[in-house]
Image: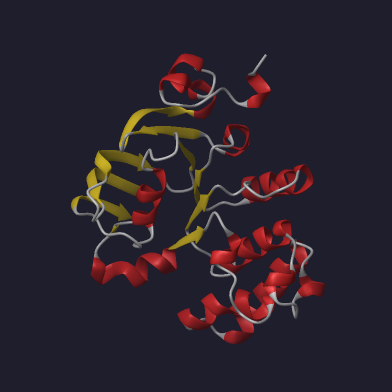
Amino acid sequence: MITVERLSFTYPDGTKALRNVSLSIHSGESAGIIGANGAGKSTLVNHINGWLIPQSGSMTVDGIKCLKTNQETLRQKVGLVFQNPDDQLFMSSLFDDIMFGPDNLGIPREKSEAEAERLLREFGLWELREKPPSRLSQGQKRFAAFAGVLVMHPSVLVMDEPTSDLDPRNRKKLISLVSSLSSTKITVSHDLDFIWDTCRKVFIMNNGQIKAQGPAREILVNETLLEDNGLELPLRLQR
C-alpha cells in the first residue's frame, strides 16, 4: 500500500510543486494521476521510488518510509518507466540494458537472463537484443524500457506518459500489457483514454494539490470538473 500524508515539496528556485498532498493507493490497485502541465504529478511520483525525499509530510510504500536511508530499498520495490525511453536506455546493446538493473541488484544472472529473454520475446524484441538501443524505433524503445523495469519484478510500477510516442497498434499492445500486470500500477498521463482503459481510480492534481479523487469512470465523465482543472473529456466521450 502507498500512503501519502501532507506531503509538500519546493524546488530550489522557489517553485512549490506539492502542497499538503494526501492520498492512498492499495496494493494491486491501478491508479491514474492526471492534471495540466505543472500540476505536480511528476514531482509526486518521483517521491514514490525515492528520487525525491519529502521536505515535509511523509510517504510510505508497503510500510517503507521515503527517507534518504531507504532510497535503495524503495528503488528495488518501485519500477519507474520514464516519459522518454532514451533516459533509460544507455548501454551498448539492448540485452545489456535489460540486464543492467538485475546486475546492479545482485539478482542471480541465470535467473535474470531467463526473465530478460522471456520479456524480449514477449515484446517482439529478442531478435534485436544485440542492437544498440539508439537504433530501435520509438515504439521498440518504449517496450524495451518496460522490459528493463519488469525484469526486476517491482511490486509497484510507475509510468510517466507511457503512450506519448506510440502509434495506435503499439498503444493497444501497451494497454493489454498494463492490464495484465498484477502489481500496483500508477500512471501519469494526459492520455485520458489510456487512463480510462487501464485505471480504476483517478486523482486530479492542480497547483500541487489533489483537487478530486474517485473511480476513474466517474471522474473522467465529469466535464466541468475536468475543465476546471485544465483537462478535457477522453476523446471517446467528446461529441
Q: Nearer the viewer, residue 65 or 49?
A: 49
The spot of residue 136 in percent (x, y) is 74, 67
Whether 130 is drawn above or below 228: the answer is: below
What's the colour scheme? secondary structure
Dividing the picture into quadrants, the one containing residue 100 is bottom right
Q: Is residue 1 visible?
A: no
> Is 94 displayed left or right of 215 in the figure?
right
Say which residue appears at 49% left-offset and 59% top-offset.
80
Left/right of residue 28 with respect to residue 73 in the rendered view: right
- Count of labels in the image: 0
Write the residue at 59% across / 86% down.
Answer: 109
Q: Quadrant of residue 134?
A: bottom right
Q: Residue at x 60, y 26 (%)?
A: 234
Q: Position of residue 123 (x, y in %)?
A: 74, 61
Drawn side of residue 166 relative to residue 20, left or right? right
Residue 11 visible, this angle: yes
Q: Position of residue 112 (x, y in %)?
A: 61, 78
Residue with the most extreme left position:
56
- The x, y position of residue 180, in whole percent, is 65, 49
Vertical side of 179 occupied by 82: above or below: below
Q: Residue furthest right?
A: 127
Q: Nearer the viewer, residue 174 or 12?
A: 12
Q: Quadrant of the C terminus?
A: top right
Give me the residue at 48% from left, 23% from top: 219
Give 51 or 200, whichever is nearer the viewer: 51
Corner quadrant of residue 22: top left
